[in-house]
Image (cartoon, rainbow, N blue to C red):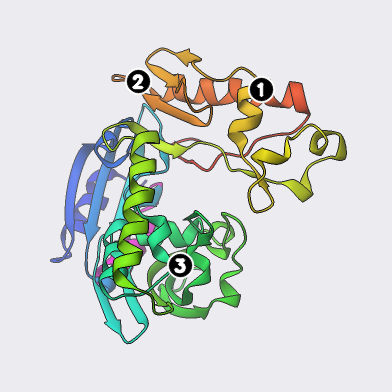
Amino acid sequence: MPTTRNALESLSSLPKLSVKQGVPLSQYTRFGIGGPADILAETVDEATFAKAFQMARASGLPFTVLGQGTNLIVNDDGFRGIVLRYTASGMRVDGTQISVDAGAVLQKLVDFSIDQALEGLHTMTGIPGWVGAAIYGNAGAYGHSISEFVRQARFLDTSGNAAPAVLTIDNAACQFEYRESVFKRQKDWIILSAELELPRGDRAALRRKADEILEIRNAKYPPTMKCAGSIFKNLLLKNLPEPVREQVPAAVIREGKVPSAWFLEQAGAKGRSRGNIEVASYHANLIYNTGGGTATDLCALIRELKTRVERQFGILLEEEVQYVGYP
């Protein structure tokens, strides 16, 4: 029978692995919500991470992989099992190519690219989280997505019962779509690093534009706010039923997408709350923890908003956030 003690002893035998017990996962989510993990193990060493993954799988206990937790809702009861984190964060440049580890903070990559006078990532300034998660969810803003610049991605293939293998795929094989990638569908593929190709730009102009975007983003999503940014994905206009498309004002459509916030606002989402979880009064797709909020209330409010929009428009909003510790 698998036991936490046996798993703890096994993982602790790896010299480059930091192993802790009972760590509140609220410390690893931007919502500041989530109960403890039985075991939290992290490393910057690729080979050690692969070995730790193999041990976690062999333990028979539930296990999962976390990044910075920007887009996560963790159960109030925490995670009964092993949480693994790969925290390597190196960045290297060669001409117009940047190699970056999955654990690098996206903002640091943005700033690094601007310093190198490379264009494209500057519009993503202020988006929280790690690079691995940005590629996983094809993050983007203001006309650009990270998929435009990913030349190739390296990942740990943990499928099957064999030892995890490090593989590399090109941009086409990443199957990027709006807020989607192959990594969302292949849950056994864990991003380790990526190589990006960016065009040359004017350093000063890129910095000015990034600063303008950051000012707008910080006004909408203050850095101290306990939130995950937008809760729901925006919708592609072409995928909406014709009766719904006819209701959408042309002024709110951007690059073929309709903001979920528009549908939520029509459904009366602004200012609604459950316990210490609230929808912003100025942005219907922003839910935040005012302090002491719970995942139970957060999930209940998300369900309520989805129901309201479905009843009014007949469409089902899809969350950008991911869930940890739930069936």
Q: In the rendered structure, which amino acid carries the disc numbered 2?
A: Gly
Residue 293's disc number: 2
Quarter residue 176 falls in: bottom right
Considering only vertical position in the picture, is 11 above or below 158?
above
Q: Earlier in the sequence, mark 1 or mark 3?
A: 3
Q: Which residue position is annotated with label 3?
A: 158
Mark 2 or mark 3, which is nearer to you? 2
Q: In the rendered structure, which amino acid carries the disc numbered 1?
A: Gln
Considering only vertical position in the picture, is 216 above or below 127?
above
Q: CA distance from mark 2 to mark 3?
A: 35 Å
Where's residue 312, x and y in %?
Answer: 75, 22
Q: In the rendered structure, which amino acid carries the disc numbered 3?
A: Thr
Label 2 Cα crowd, 10 Å radius (few <14 / some 14-19 / many 20+): many
- Work out which residue is located at the far right of the displayed protein and give it: 242
Residue 109's disc number: none
Q: Which residue position is annotated with label 1?
A: 266
Q: Is residue 276 magenta?
A: no
Please indicate, yes or no, whether residue 102 appears anywhere in the rendered image: no
